[in-house]
Amino acid sequence: MDRSSETLAGVAFGRFRVLPHRRELLADGRPIKLGGRAFDVLMALIEARGAVVTKDALMTRVWPDRIVERNNLQAHISALRKAFGAERELIRTIAGRGYQFTGEIRTASAGAERQAGTGVTPAEKRPPTNLQAPVSELIGRDTEIEELSSLIGAHRLVTLTGPGGIGKTRLALAVARRLLPQFADGVWLAEFSPLADPGLVPATVVAAVGLELGTGEVSAQRVAEALANRRLLLVLNTCEHVIAAAAAIAEAVLRAGPAVRIIATSREPLRAEGERIYPVPPLAVSAAEYDDPWQYGAIQLFVVRSRASGAHVSEDRHTAAVIAAICRRLDGIPLAIELAAARNAALGIEELSARLDDRFQLLTGGRRTALPRHQTLRAMLDWSYELLPEPERAVLRRLAVFAGFFSLEAASTVSTSPHLAPSEAVDGLSSLVAKSLVVVEVDGPLAHYRLLDTTRAYVLEKLGESGERQRLARRHSEYYRNLFERAETEWETRATDEWLADYARQIDNLRTALDWAFSPDGEASIAVALTAAAVPLWMHLSLLDECRGRVDRALAILGTGPNRNPHGEMKLHAALGALLINTRGVTGPEIGAAWTKTLEIAESLEDADYQLRSLRGLWFFHTAGGRHRVALELAQRFCTLAANGPYPSDRLVVEGMIGVSQFYRGDLPPARRHFERLLANYVTPDHRQLIIRFQLDLQVTARLFLARILWLQGCPDQALRAAESTVEDARATNHAWSLCYALALGACPIALLVGDLAAAEHHIGTLLHHSTRHSLARWRAFGRSHQGVLAIKRGDLITGLQLVRAAFDELNDAGSACRSPPCRSPPS
């Protein structure tokens, strides 16, 4: 035993006494059976006097000079909490840190203990209650218990709201047990879930508190008068189906006397006078890569319940990642996590994760003693759904077509019908938010809504049963076609951050709309128009593979469809040309074909903008193929067309195109003049529009080629500084392709040529990271070739040659020509 324990003759907290010299724990004067290790844990926590004790410190204290699993410590903490019964919150879990003893400690001298005979002082009278001791630990709710305990002190009515299975009842009861000592007349639970008649609410409260009202009608007012002078806490549990009666009795009780406090649990607020609403959050779930995922409440709950069902759960990183993914898909809802954990012993976590799409069949078999609606996931949602009036059911079903976040405008547009006006749809959405069936997130002046994944899966079934799914899917796709056509127009005029804030969050709905439009039951014209309009978003987010797949599919539909859409076809061919350059290299014949087709359609439509885009694409294609005379002619055609075009910045594009062509033809002085003129007249606000139209930032291009010219003209230090400046400019564009371009053709090769191998290594690492992250195979091949040159310069010839050979094979597979500065010394 630790020496500090020996100085304590007796320790008291609440109804408990600890006798360190006898290694005993007593409750109300009666000994409680406790193992030796658990007693050591208790003493370590008591001696900390309210400070947090880390898990490592406890394990060192209890198991000195031994290596044991942390599960052993958790088992003894659970044993102590079980011994404390209703006061199990005497030991708090501090997430990520350890444990804390929260009892108010009193000590007594040895003489006083001996005089008492039994070694304890008389047991203090405890306030009465009908709360039962918890059977299992409430996991992951320490913060919520603290917040609610404070709220009850400041507000007389606190309502816990949240979707079914979020744990409102268990949280309310945990707080009520913790607050029991503060209420001389007790803490009482009135359970409304069995009630079918709201008129029985007052009688239920009477029975819960044990009031004697005599004969006559049991009304809310009579109950309030009986409680008027009592200092008690009343828990009104499961109010949503008797919401008006629950609100009435809560208001009556609070008006009758000042000493009563009320905790209510409900899917929606009572809307009673003086009510403070506390939305119960889901259990926290870690990102899979987090340093210590095991500290998160959702994962802890899954592990504890899995082990209780007999499953073995290892504590490796892969297991943590799979469990975290399961908990995220279940929205951090404790009931759903417990049901999933109960299946872990039979299926294992990998199979469990794979089967979650069929979650309503899988997640059954809850505790036999649980309420029927809590024994399966479907029953829980059935309860919520059946409580809704039919107009709200219709709105909820129709909202199932949305994936991820949606706006009020989107909800109103998609969910209205001849029998449901837009105003009714808005009212229905507001009510569903209040009833915790729709999640709302306010970001600045706008609110965004979404369904929890589990709720959406359920109401999608209901939507299918209603026969409305096809009509709603079409309306959803039409809405997002119109939305992204507007986004395409706004891209050239709005600030990037603002534009992305409005449209980047719509990526899930974009995908869902396209999935339907491309399906056999979908609409080809919507698929083509939506794909073409969404290209700017995909390009800015560097989702190039996804964009390429959608564009290929849209072009295939155009090839077989009876109705031609020339504008859509032109946009898709232009997008394909840009995507092929980004993902397949720059010399393949299909690239030239895509841009030639774009130019052909643009000329037939007299669309000057897409003529310029296609001329630029063809110029790039011929430049990469070494056909610099053809490229220069295309640049001059571009110059003639741009002179009368709507974009002044196109004249800067001409400077860059002619400068590059002259660079590759060896005309360095005029090339340098073109790039310097471009930079001198560069206008920053145009760069967003230019990136989408021409795939590269002009400033990045100009600085890159100036750096290469400086190298060739014998200024290596200036060249390296210019190349590194180019990288910073590219980072500022937040455009992955521009950054890879600046690294692959500027900073990496020039650092190698100058001999700054540390800088070369840094730039090569950045290039490999970004090209891999954004699936830019051509730039990844460049990175590996530079990596090979770096290895050779450091003396590892074999590894270097292997890397260079592999890189050239990748470039050849992609149809790309490697065009980087010549690896020779600068002229003297």
Image: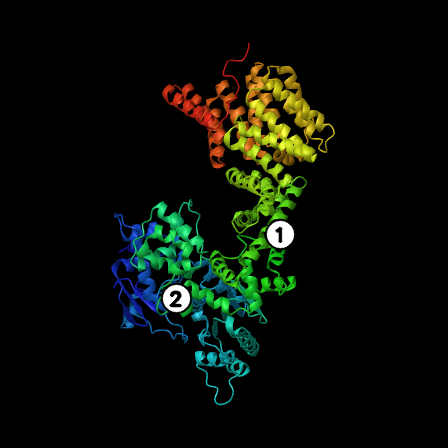
Q: Sequence order check: which comes first, mark 2 or mark 1? A: 2
Residue 323 vs 761, above or below: the answer is: below
The residue beneath circle 2 is 375
Apparent side of residue 338 relative to residue 390 in the rendered image (left or right): left
What residue is drawn where x is 66% and y is 21%? 674
Name the residue type under label 2. Gln
Question: Label 1 is placed on what type of residue?
Answer: Gly
Circle 2/circle 1 CB separation < 8 Å: no
Q: Nearer the viewer, residue 142 or 108?
A: 142
Quadrant of the image for the C terminus? Answer: top right
Residue reaching furthest to the front: 562
Q: Nearer the viewer, residue 648 or 630?
A: 630
Q: Which mark is residue 444?
A: 1
Label 1 Cα crowd, 10 Å radius (few <14 / some 14-19 / many 20+): few
How many C-alpha atoms fall within 10 Å of the one at disc 2: few (<14), some, or many (≥20)? many
Where residue 106 appears, as percent x and y from the top left, is 37, 65
Res 441 → quadrant = bottom right
Image-quadrant location for residue 37: bottom left
Give the secondary structure at mark 2. Answer: loop
Alpha carbon distance from label 2 to label 1: 40 Å
